[in-house]
Amino acid sequence: MSIPLPQPLVTRTVEVPDLGDLIAHLPGADLTDALSWVRRGDGIVGLGEIARIETTGPRRFADADAAWHELTATAVVRDAVELPGSGLVCFGSFSFSRRSSAGGVLVVPEVVIGRRDGVSWVTTTSTGTLPIADPLTGWPVEAPRPTPSVRYLEGALSAADWQAAVREVIDVIRSGAVGKVVMARDVLAELDSAPDARHVLGRLADEYDSCWTFAVDGMIGATPELLVRRERGLISSRVLAGTIQRTGDDARDLARAGALARSSKDLEEHEFAVDSLTESLRAFASSTSAPDTPYVLHLPNVMHLATDVTAVPAPEHADMSSLAVAAALHPTAAVCGTPTLPAADVITEHERMDRGRYAAPVGWMGADGDGEWGIALRSAAVVDATTLRLFAGCGIVAASDPAAELVEAEAKLAPMRMALG
């Protein structure tokens, strides 16, 4: 839980001239310290740390949400911008499993640099006194580090053993015990020197600008999947399930996109994920809306079947924070399976690893509870200064082929491999 502060937080947000590349303003080069939530040039990055909330176990979300509410209740906030991401905010990252030692964290930065819809701002937070007027002068940017060389090692399972595990899961699915299981795979990246956070995150943001480039407490990546956005009373979410690798040839990729949109295996997997999300939303929403058919989301490395879902909270749930909504939706069928609890048991038995904070909520939240939480996909966890653990996951259904799933997993590792290389 949070460590009590001697005095309440005092936050001030002011509009500033455009600051250019947000990620380039990160002063330190360490991935563990970086705080980022950026998409298509807009978003927020954090500098320093003024407060931290840490939680573990089954109540990691609820305890963090309660501690954040307690922290913000006494805060003094002066926000001259009043846009999503301005004012007092925290960055957060949580473990996939309630049993994981990775737990959850909310970090309140000393300084936040943000931009949205052409408006730029700087937020400063201190304890007890009004923050200084020009906070960026206290954060000199370090010289860039050289790009390290990287070698990749097998993670919890070798490629062959992972395919064998997928075959076992297909047998479980065909027995009727579950309809879909998402199997994750990890790979270790060993670097000959510590990477530069600005380089790694900057490459992700440039190459995958339609994704949310995130960094929180050593969990980094570029996720295409938005678990929940709560903004002015409306909840929205993006479901991704069903994937095909790109070839780099536009004509061939267009044909592959058409094949993906007609694939019975991928459409079945996607339907599982959408139905799971809408069913979870019904517990606290007065209405939900989702199109009948998915669209194809084109990314540099893969294409996904995607569906954007919106919901209006029921009056009795209007005060649910974005984090509370994220907790209610996690884990989705897109990252766990269907039905959720049996699929989670299959994952525990056959993945043979702790996912940590992979495939779990990551994002930010404001003092009013609004915020954005993605799912930590296309991501890596910092193990130490020169070691990262890369993750990829594949939705397994009865028609899945283990060799094809391994190819898909490799394609999903491409963003982090590119960012490190």
Image (cartoon, rainbow, N blue to C red):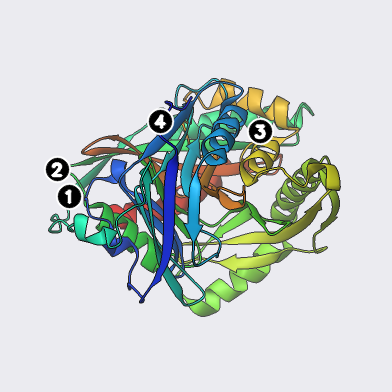
Quadrant in which the C terminus is drawn: bottom left
Horizontal and vertical percent position of residue 77: 49, 52
4, 346: nearer the viewer:
4
Q: CA distance from mark 4 to mark 3?
A: 51 Å
Labels 2 & 4 near each other (Cβ < 8 A): no
Q: CA distance from mark 2 to mark 3?
A: 39 Å
Q: CA distance from mark 4 to mark 1?
A: 42 Å
Horizontal and vertical percent position of residue 291: 80, 64
Inspect this view and state whether residue 221 appears. no
119, 38: nearer the viewer:
119
Q: CA distance from mark 1 to mark 3?
A: 37 Å
Name the residue type under label 3.
Answer: Ile
> In this rendering, is residue 398 above or below 306?
above
Which of the two discs, 2 and 1, labels the residue nearer the N terminus?
A: 1
Labels 2 & 3 near each other (Cβ < 8 A): no
Name the residue type under label 4.
Answer: Leu
Which of the two discs, 2 and 3, labels the residue nearer the N terminus?
A: 3
Pointer 2 residue? 192
- For residue 5, the mark is 4
Horizontal and vertical percent position of residue 331: 65, 36
